Amino acid sequence: MTLKQLSVASECAPFVKTGGLADVVGALGPVLATHGIESRVLLPLYRQIAHLAKGGRVILDAGSLFGGPVRVLSKRAGGIDLLLIDAPHLYDRPGQIYLNEGGVDWVDNHLRFGLLGWLGAEIARSGIAGWQPDVIHAHDWQAGLTPVYARQRGGAVPCVLTIHNIAFQGNFPATTMGALDLDPKGFTQDGYEYFGQIGFLKGGLMQADRITTVSPTYARELMTPEFGMGLEGVLAARKSDLTGILNGIDTKVWDPATDPALAQSYTSRTLAKKTVNKQAVLDRFGLGRDTRAPLFSVISRLSEQKGLDLALEALPAVLDKGARFVLLGSGAAELEHGFNELAARFPGLVGVEIGFDEDLAHLIQAGADATLVPSRFEPCGLTQLCAMRYGTLPIVSVTGGLADTVIDANEAALAAGCATGFQFAPTSAAKLGDALDRAMSLFADVKAWQKVQRNAMKHPVGWGRSAQRLADIYRDLAER
């Protein structure tokens, strides 16, 4: 029997994306279909994706909700069945989807994402256009009120809540309770109250039937003060309902054999062709034509979480030894400035592009020899998975999903033929420097390096096993 699932999310690739959450939501539907699950995605119709409304069918006119008229449109695009929330007063705006043009959170984000959860719960309770889910899957704080509203209305459809990054929790003043149509009886320590505020994520964690996060190690970390960010007690109390399931990537989108963004396609059997992409990256950044020197890369949001201040400290030593480095990303002004200064200090060796370009990200993954992910915490991380798929060896800190996905190229792993990259701990500039030195040494041994590259390219990074685990959770809940 086909099981019906509704994903409630604020982002979905390839339509609207600020991070890995969108990639996960976008990949899940098609993968779950192979496990006999019919999936739809409830998504705000932001101005950035207003074109999706063309050809969409209005399947619900909800009247006035959260301050203005609300409709839901049905649209299939990119192989995904979308339910688009058409609420111009909340979503038809310039700027980013969470931030205004000044880079500050929209002051009514509680309404914008409260509506998302409200509609998710309503569709679960009453169905929409003859379709009703057997299970709801809410993603991160933006959908955190979905299980709260569902319980408030006595809904029987079970709910899974996934924590993609607990650093973002969605806490708002208690005075917004009425505007959010929340039952005041739920404003308790055992409900959605969080230090005197309304906690979107906290409420969801209390009311969801099951909680998942994006790697086994991160699941364990979340129950500690170091990583739980104030919610460790809530998660420890729900330990039996918490499961860490590794994220995957779309292996059709990320495939060096067919990727149209590459200068040259290649496979694990034709690794020599990878050099064409390396030269293309060097050309793009004006770094000469010496493909024999190792090329390190960073493709990332620039933030303290990502540990990129450590990279700024550690990179000069390997650049002095002739390595090259390229960066694609944007974020904290001090880090943008720091990497631009590094490029000025090492002309011809360092290339920096502030911003994001999807095609360039693919080309860098194919052209670099190694990529740096020195995060202080990392729920799962997708960059290292994409890198391994392209035979670009990840250099990662031992935390979260980075610890779960990369096998360190230590002496034992190299002897056993199972290494896929480099790990370092603790998360410091000195230890990152040691890992860069180890990578430089291994790179000098062409055969040994290529062996690790092939291991990385064969490493499972798709959704196969993880999707099965999610499907099992859905079916268990639905059968109950």
Image (cartoon, rainbow, N blue to C red):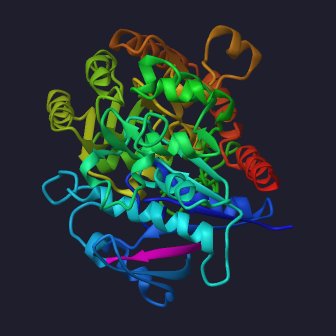
- The residue most toward the right is 1
Of residues 330 and 133, the one nearer the viewer is 133
Q: Quadrant of the N terminus?
A: bottom right
Of residues 369 and 355, the one nearer the viewer is 355
Q: How many marks?
A: 0
Residue 452 covered by magenta stretch: no
Taking the spot 52% from the left edge, 40% from the top edge, the residue there is 205
As drawn, 53 above or below 438: below
Residue 83 covered by magenta stretch: yes
As drawn, 35 above or below 239: below
Judge left or right: residue 148 versus residue 472.
left
Main secondary structure found in the magenta portion: strand
The image position of residue 241, as x and y in percent, is 67, 35
As drawn, 253 above or below 421: below
The image position of residue 411, as x and y in percent, is 65, 9
The region drawn magenta spans: 79-87
Can see residue 71? yes
Which quadrant of the structure image shows residue 227? top left
